[in-house]
Amino acid sequence: MKHLKKVLTVLLIFAMLMSVASCAGSDTSEDRVIKIGFPAPLSGTSAGVGSDMERGITLAIEDINAAGGILGHQVELVKGDVEGQEPSTVTTVINRLITRDEVDAMVTGLANPSLVELDIMEENKIPYVLYGYAQAQERLMAETPGKYSYIHNAIPTYVRYQTEFPDMVENLIASGDFSPENKKVAVVKSQNEYSLYCGEGMRDTFASYGWDIVVDETIPYERYTEFAPILSKIREEEPAIVIYTDHTAANAATFLTSFLQDPTKSLVFLQATPSYPEFKEIMAGKQDGVIWNYAASLLGEKGDAFREKYNERWGEYPNPYGGFVYDAMMIVADAMEKSGDPFDKEKVNDVLLDPDYAYEGNIGTYRFDPETRLAISGMDGIPFATYQVWDEQNIVINPPELAQDAFKLPPWYK
């Protein structure tokens, strides 16, 4: 009897060991696919940007798989449409990607302006490389230092959104390239964290330089067309600078179209929207002279090469987010490769947390600030560029090291 019990015990242990070995073997087998979650606005008001992001990450995954995958594993894109980027929708999509689709990492450009998804990523220990809404990340990191160790934002700080345009205007005045008729500024924002951060920041910077803020309006963060009262104030004050930071393409196009019906002698700055495909389509060339800037851009030889590759694949050139998300996906692939096990989320994340980690992308050199988990800005990191639109092309006018042409007065100025 004792002998029989010993035999049964040995058989049971053997069976358990075989089961464990089988599970381990299935986890590391070469036919296991790496799943990348992609929560993005594939429909709704930001669908144009979402489409560009989808093309960028698709191109990255095609390049990775064509080169043999990551440590022999092919990569699969698992999409989640966050539609209008509302918090409840984003939360639902993220949870589904984690629990139902069991993704190994997440990559996106934009999901939600307040980054409501960060807590979910951290709780589930999902390596997350995104490319946007740095102002929310800086706030969250400052409120709870050290909490978000699985979050890696490839965009640099947005602080320069608050200062770069005012500084450029001051330099243009000092050089004699711009002679404003007054020192008045009009600011129009929308009720969301990103727009308020940029608009209020530029407002305060101009005020600190001695400019008068004569219009300071905030519109709802939704489809909006009632600009007549705001434009009436602008036309009454005739400010030298008009700043509009709502990043909804349709709203920005409505505002600019209405402004151009009876323009004031003002420089017009629009936040981000001149890069959006849907904005370009609506404006159809009428946006010439508008100024805008980006914390990251496709510039230089590598950027040009990527633009051509993207155009060859999709039949058109990317707006910046196609390049952004391509690089974000490549950062994840690089971290998985260096970890030695693409399915070990902790090991992959540890690679990205390494203070010496760097990746040479199409946008620039990615190094992460250990406190904010944002990419480091600058000519030796991720360059910041200011553009002016001419002939439907976004032309770099600042900084001088990257400038493709000089600033010119907009056509309505004359």
Image (cartoon, grey):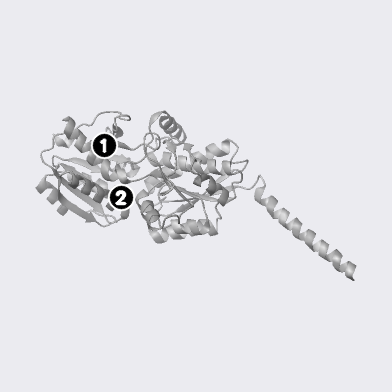
> Could you tell me residue 5's position as x and y percent?
85, 68
Q: Nearer the viewer, mark 2 or mark 1?
A: 2
> Could you tell me residue 233's position as x and y percent?
12, 51
Dot 1 amino acid type: Gly
**Res 101 quadrant in image:** bottom right
Query: Would you say 145 lies left or right of 96 here?
Result: left
Figure check: 263 above or below 228 = above
* Quarter of the rendering occupied by the N terminus: bottom right
Figure check: 32 above or below 389 = below
Per the image, the residue denoted by label 2 is 248
- Check disc 2 and report its element: helix, strand or loop: loop
Per the image, the residue denoted by label 1 is 285
- Check disc 1 and report its element: helix, strand or loop: loop
Crowding at dot 2, Cα within 10 Å, few <14 / some 14-19 / many 20+, comes out as many
State the CA–CA distance, disc 2 to disc 1.
Answer: 18 Å
Q: Nearer the viewer, residue 251 or 195?
A: 195
Q: Which residue appears at 37% of the width and 49% of the height?
A: 134
Q: Which residue appears at 49% of the width and 41% of the height?
A: 331
Q: Is residue 272 visible?
A: no
> Could you tell me residue 154's position as x and y percent?
43, 44
Q: Is residue 162 visible?
A: yes
